[in-house]
Image (spheres, grey):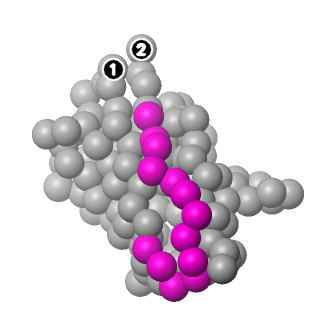
Amino acid sequence: QVQLVDPGGGLVQPGGSLRLSCAASGLTFVSYAMGWFRQAPGTEREFVAAISWGVGITFYADSVKGRFTISRDNAKNTVFLQMNSLKPEDTAMYYCAASKYSSASRKEDDYPYWGQGTQVTVSS
């Protein structure tokens, strides 16, 4: 059974930083792409970042490019999302997800496994 545990959210001031982590179990972690998505109240869930299998080719939503960094530690079956220069519009529930493919994707349908989500609030 695949499980994704993604703690690490919290309250941060605008301009601050936060690091999310997501520990995976029940799958051959190194073989699959991983992604982060987010959903703000009253909006649809949106793609944030993704990283491919192995050494990890990455890509990002335009709204976070240059501020967020996705990475993975295959030895620890963990994916991270380092968020810098946070803005109030980054406030959302953040979800990590494991893909059914090795190549990263923006499409939610490519991710059958999801964490429970962690709240990130950016406010002064």
Residue 38 visible (yes or no): no
> Considering the numbered disc 2 on the image, is that residue within a helix, a strand or a loop?
loop
| Horizontal relation, residue 77 to residue 13: left or right | left
x, y percent for residue 68 = 42, 73
- Quarter of the image with the C terminus is bottom right
Please name the residue that numbered disc 2 is placed on.
1
x, y percent for residue 114 = 53, 35
Instruction: Name the residue rendered at 45%, 50% in the picture.
Output: 8
Q: Nearer the viewer, residue 117 or 71?
A: 117
**Amino acid type at image mark 1:** Gly
Instruction: Name the residue rendered at 34%, 37% in the picture.
Output: 23
Instruction: Name the residue rendered at 62%, 72% in the picture.
Output: 122
Residue lying furthest left: 75
> Considering the numbered disc 1 on the image, is that residue within a helix, a strand or a loop?
loop
Q: Residues within 10 Å of mark 2 (few under 14, many from 20)?
A: few
What segment carries the magenta color? Answer: 5-17
x, y percent for residue 33 = 35, 46
- Quarter of the image with the N terminus is top left
Q: Residues within 10 Å of mark 1 (few under 14, many from 20)?
A: few
Q: Is residue 35 above or below residue 120?
A: above
Please name the residue that numbered disc 1 is placed on.
26
Please say whether residue 52 is one of the residues in the magenta stretch: no
| Horizontal relation, residue 14 to residue 70: left or right | right
Residue 26 visible (yes or no): yes
**Amino acid type at image mark 2:** Gln
Q: Nearer the viewer, residue 123 or 56?
A: 123
Q: Could you tell me how far apart the alpha carbons at marks 2 and 1 are, in whole angstroms?
A: 5 Å
Q: Is residue 95 above or below residue 86?
A: above
